[in-house]
Image (cartoon, rainbow, N blue to C red):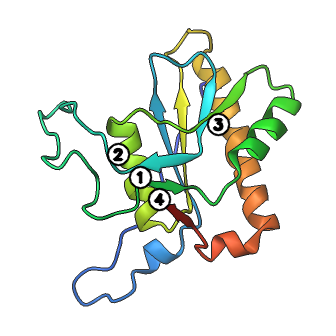
């Protein structure tokens, strides 16, 4: 596994004279990964929340409004059915337990996820992983993330309407 490379792919929104940024349009799914000291499984987050942010981040910042986006919907679901992804990955017997959550924690992970869901029209995912060794190794987590992302892409391929940013905002 030491020879395996890690890759982060990003895209940018329109700016300057670029009404459409091809790097943004090319991305079909943004997947974010964060650590959770509470997690004992690899956890797929179904939705991001707009309100309830009260803790300072590492730069001592917390939005004065305690929300991500003024007047934004309270909750945004991913277009992906995380229960389906979870079941498929668990059924594949990769040696890592996967679960689903509807609360990413009202800290940086939830803030990032909500913002990504809002800007990406629901075509985002967030995966919480437990701390290394509690109970999984980096190889275990890498294997799980690979299986999870593959199942997410399979779902998007089966449900092309989801790729058209058919997201659900809940008030």
Rendered position, 91 above or below 37: below
> Which of the two marks, 2 or 3, is nearer to us in this view?
2
Picture quadrant where residue 79 is located: bottom right
Left/right placement of residue 39 relative to residue 152 reads left
Q: Which secondary structure lies at badge 2?
A: helix
Left/right placement of residue 119 relative to residue 167 reads left
The location of residue 61, given as percent across then percent down, is 13, 39
The location of residue 40, given as percent across then percent down, is 59, 15
CA gap, disc 1 to disc 4?
5 Å
Picture quadrant where residue 78 is located: bottom right
Reading the image, the residue beneath label 3 is 145
Reading the image, the residue beneath label 1 is 114
The location of residue 20, given as percent across then percent down, is 39, 86
CA gap, disc 3 to disc 1?
20 Å
Residue under the image location 22 percent in, 45 percent down: 66
Reading the image, the residue beneath label 2 is 111
Residue under the image location 69 percent in, 45 percent down: 82
The N terminus - image quarter = top right
The answer to whether marks 2 and 4 mark residues whose Cβ atoms lie closer than 8 Å is no
Reading the image, the residue beneath label 4 is 117
Crowd class of label 4 (few under 14; some 14 to 19; many from 20; radius 10 Å): many
């Amino acid at each position: 596994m030491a020879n395996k490379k890690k890759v982060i792919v990003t895209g940018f929104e329109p700016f300057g004279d670029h009404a459409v940024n091809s790097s943004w349009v090319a991305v079909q799914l943004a997947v974010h990964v964060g650590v959770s000291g509470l997690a004992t499984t690899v956890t797929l987050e179904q939705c991001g929340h707009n309100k309830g942010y009260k803790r300072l981040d590492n730069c001592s910042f917390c939005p004065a409004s305690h929300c991500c986006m003024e007047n934004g919907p309270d909750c945004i679901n991913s277009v992906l059915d995380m229960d389906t992804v979870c079941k498929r990955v668990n059924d594949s017997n990769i040696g890592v337990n996967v679960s689903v959550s509807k609360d990413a924690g009202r800290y940086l992970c939830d803030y990032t996820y909500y913002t990504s869901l809002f800007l990406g029209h629901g075509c985002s995912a967030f995966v919480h992983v437990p701390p290394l060794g509690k109970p999984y190794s980096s190889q275990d987590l890498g294997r799980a993330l690979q299986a999870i992302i593959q199942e997410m892409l399979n779902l998007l391929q089966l449900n092309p309407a989801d790729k058209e940013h058919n997201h659900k905002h809940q008030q």
